Amino acid sequence: MFERYTGEAWEARFLPRLTYQEIAALPKEDALVILPIGAIEQHGPHMPVMTDALIGEAVLTHALDQLDEEGNIWLLPPLAYGKSNEHLDFPGTISLSASTLQGLVTDIATSVAKAGFRRLVLFNTHGGNTDLLNVAARELRISTGLMVFFLSPSSLNAAHDLLSDEEKEYGIHAGDYETSLVMAIKPAWVHTDKLVREIPDLSGLHYLTLEGKTRFAWVMSDISSSGAMGDSTQATSAKGELILSRCATTLALALKELATFEISTVRSAPREEMSVRDA
């Protein structure tokens, strides 16, 4: 049986374990609330459909274990489902519509702001959520005044020297990176006898890429017969442990910075105002 919300991080920093009076009494000035957002979607013949949610919770657990106990950083229950309609041709995928996901995130964030918190992290582990959550973050900044931050394990750049050039280009789903992580987090859930290498044929194309500056719209069945993209045959648990450790360390440092960030300090004075002041 897979147990969620385990470990010291979830015991000490799980916001819903508090009473409403305890939450009201929390100092909000330097508080940071984290909403993990994943997906339940196919990850090839070798990986569980819970891969994205699993990775997010593991990275957060290891990162928060590195923080000082007195830190004012809090976890919300993870939102395991995401916008995954690009994977619906494969059984087991459970997708929210764009409007449903945006509505959920908006309602949760609005409630966080209503409780007096000023900072919210959207910690996302599914690429298909990215564009939508960026839009939601901007709208929330406008509608609630929250400082909204967007983070993902892939943005932490923890595997840049561990993956082949081919994998960096094409390993976007259930490839070496994700498979290595799940091998380290929950090895019994990886079917090592079904590891697959699948690379798209983009030969002859000079401008189009899957995720570059010139993209084309696709669903997974357009570009992959297995449901995976990348080379999971290169994955190892040792590599996954290293990626997990690096992700956690970088994330812990980032969270410390976000917890005290003030958006009002970013805007610089107009050039003419600076010249008068400096005269």
Image (cartoon, rainbow, N blue to C red):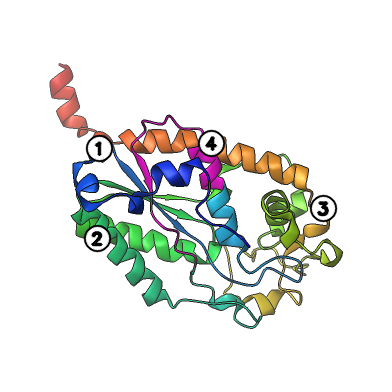
Residue 238 image point, x, y percent: 77, 42
Label placed on residue 267: 1
Q: Of callouts 3 and 4, which one flags the residue occurring earlier in the amino acid sequence?
A: 3
271 displayed left or right of 254: left
Amino acid beneath label 3 = Gln
Q: Secondary structure at mark 2?
A: helix
170 displayed left or right of 81: right
Task: Return the residue nearer the eye: 53 or 3.
Answer: 3
- Residue under pointer 4: 250
Q: Nearer the viewer, mark 4 or mark 1?
A: 4
Which residues lie in the magenta part?
A: 59-80
Q: Nearer the viewer, mark 2 or mark 3?
A: 2
Residue 113 image point, x, y percent: 22, 54
Classify 10 Å Cα crowding around label 4: few (below 14), some (14-19), many (20 and above). Answer: some
Q: Secondary structure at mark 1?
A: loop
- Residue under pointer 3: 234
Amino acid beneath label 1 = Arg
Label placed on residue 110: 2
Classify 10 Å Cα crowding around label 1: few (below 14), some (14-19), many (20 and above). Answer: few
Q: Is residue 251 visible?
A: no
Q: Of callouts 3 and 1, which one flags the residue occurring earlier in the amino acid sequence?
A: 3
